[in-house]
Amino acid sequence: MVDREETAFVYTLSSRKGMVQQALRSIATLKQHVDVEKINIFYTPPYDEEDEKALKETGANVVKKENQTEAFNVSRSLPESHYGEKINLCSLEEKNVVFLDCDTIVGNNIWEVLEGDFEFKARPAHRFNDDKDWKKMFDERDRPYLDWMPNAGFLVFKEGAHRKIQDDWANLVSQDLEFQMGKVDHHEQYALALTISDLKIHEMKKKEHVFEWKDEKVADAYIYHVAHSAGSSIMNVVKNYLGRLKP
């Protein structure tokens, strides 16, 4: 059994692109399974007074932080506006840490996903079969090879693994890793793959983390992950889920 007293749940967000609104919806579903004092929100620039008030009204622990890394692009067509803010989760003192993106909905007892003998758990976002550049990234840094990149929308760290990788992850996010998958640069996830490759890893199943943007349809899943562009869809998921909770 996972030690619930030694487990924290984490969001990182700023007042950009509807992140706060999405987080409020996600937190509402998480609170059906988790005591609110276990929920932490790292709130980074840009700030907004009304957004900050709304986040505090959830009852979660809101920590106001400056950006932790230099800005980087996720796409050649977008300005440098992304930061390695997930690194903030590594500062938590609890033994186990669960990270959730703002655009996730908790649909089932999330504690069940934490059961098992592992240090890190995520669902593969992309698997690299014979990609020489991906393998080169590991070889050049003398890291154990991991042939897949974690989707960072739902991450589980156990047995203090998040603290173990803190410095390494921060260092790699700040480097040019000389790798890009197509037009999108998942820089933070590349760095994460490198840092967790020597941990005891479990791959999440589809029911544990549903990629709704891939039109996956899974009943009674633990986490439903909706792409930012699917704003109307996420509202339907929340309404349907919260509606089932009413007596």
Image: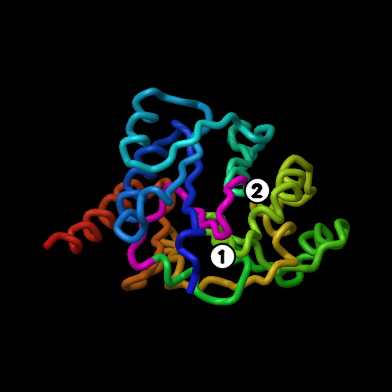
Instruction: Tell me if 9 is positioned left or right of 65 in this view.
Output: left
The quarter holding residue 108 reads bottom left
The image position of residue 187, as x and y in percent, is 67, 47
Identify the residue shown where x is 81% and y is 57%: 137
Label 1 Cα neighbours within 10 Å, binned few <14 / some 14-19 / many ≥20: many
Instruction: Tell me if 159 is positioned left or right of 110 in this view.
Output: right
Identify the residue shown where x is 47% and y is 53%: 9
Considering every residue shown, the one lying at the far top of the view is 49
Instruction: Tell me if 151 is positioned left or right of 137 in this view.
Output: left
Three-letter residue code for mark 2: Glu
The image position of residue 107, as x and y in percent, is 33, 64
Asked whether residue 38 is drawn in magenta, I would say no
The image position of residue 200, as x and y in percent, is 67, 71
Counting every numbered tag in the picture gives 2
Considering every residue shown, the one lying at the far left of the view is 247
Res. 209 mark? none
> Label 1, on which residue?
122
Res. 188 mark? 2
Residue 233 visible in rendering: no
- Is the residue 73 above or below the residue 166 in the image? above
Closer-to-camera residue (196/123): 196
Identify the residue shown where x is 81% and y is 61%: 138
Closer-to-camera residue (93/89): 93
Q: Secondary structure at mark 1?
A: strand
Q: Mark 2 or 1 closer to N-term?
A: 1
Three-letter residue code for mark 1: Ala
The quarter holding residue 19 reads top left
Q: Which residues are magenta?
A: 91-109
